[in-house]
Image (cartoon, helix red, strand yellow):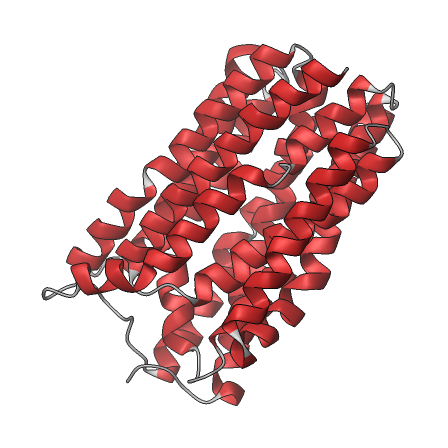
Amino acid sequence: MAGSSLKKAVPIVLLFGVVSLLADVSYEGLRSFLPVGVEETLALGGLVGVGEIVAWGLRPLSGLLVDLTGGYWVAVYTGYALVPVGVLLAAASGSGALLAAGYWAERLGKAVRSPARDTLLGSVAPKGKRGLVFGLHELLDQLGAITGPLMVYVIVRYGLPLWLLAVPGAFTVPALLAAHREYQRLGVKPVSGHGGRVAAGVKASIPAIAMVAFLGALTPNPLTVEHIASLYNLEKTMLPLVYTAAMASDALAAVPLGMLYDKSRSASIVAIIVSVVASATILLAYPRWETVFVAALLAGVAEAGYETVARAMTKTATGYGLLGLARGLGYGGSILLYGWLALALH
């Protein structure tokens, strides 16, 4: 059975959201710490760049493998288990090689779990409610993304140990077990790419893939916005709050964008385009530390669109894997574009 009633789907969506919330506290916190732990622009770009290649570039392979083997839950459990492992490794030094290794290990977990998780989420979405399902999940996901940088703010300001970030990530496993039980109770099956449906899944995902690759490259990346704020003398301990602003607007925009998608796909895409243009204009035309917060808020709306609208447009794990690759290309393009513009304008 593909799909379910909204009433039956909500508990599973919420449990998956709690899993993502806990993981995001750990890994988004670690990501927001990077500009603090790595001060050199090129070193930061290299560290983040490799991590994004791992996180996004390996997703097509991960998605294809789970479509062919049916190992959706194995991939999800493995991927989430790497969150606390990566954070603990990064926290062992707080800088240098171990920080990079830990960050990259967590990014590998992201690549392993994401296509499988999104396929499972899509399989419980009732007809005409895919946008809402992914919007609810993104809302909870982003609550963790907000909490993580705030936790880092407290850690940095008061000199607390970075390993504290691993604690929420460790609780993803019991939450995932609960989600697994509910999923089995509902009795739905993933929309698998197995049996010759891989090509069909890829074809159905092309519009979403094109959107996130092109618009993603034009969207000011929240990490880049955070770095630009540092160039304009924003206090170092305040930098994670810029990232938090983007995550907050992402959370607030996710459900409305998802519901808008369910009513009108074109209108939801227009909303994403408007937020991209407004964010880039403010960041480039008015480069001040004060305005970067506004740019971050608008960039967060665009991020919500990619995580809600684009995921609702996608089918099968292979499709989600290719969407992730396109997302990563756009993400990397944004870092290069705005990183270069930040140096040119400063």
Height in image: 85 above or below 100?
A: below
Q: Quadrant of the C terminus?
A: top right
Residue at 54% from the left image edge and 77% from the top image edge: 264
Examine the rendering and report whether any part of residue 173 can be seen: yes
Examine the rendering and report whether any part of residue 180 can be seen: no
Percent coordinates x, y for residue 47 in the rendering: 52, 19
State the residue in front, 104 or 210: 210
Which picture quadrant has residue 318? bottom left
Residue at 61% from the left image edge and 24% from the top image edge: 91
In this view, the residue farthest toward the left is 195
State the residue in front, 61 or 161: 61
Residue at 44% from the left image edge and 23% from the top image edge: 50
State the residue in front, 2 or 131: 131
Height in image: 181 above or below 99?
A: below
Height in image: 339 above or below 175?
A: above
Percent coordinates x, y for residue 205 in the rendering: 33, 60
Percent coordinates x, y for residue 43 in the rendering: 57, 12
Height in image: 53 above or below 182?
A: above
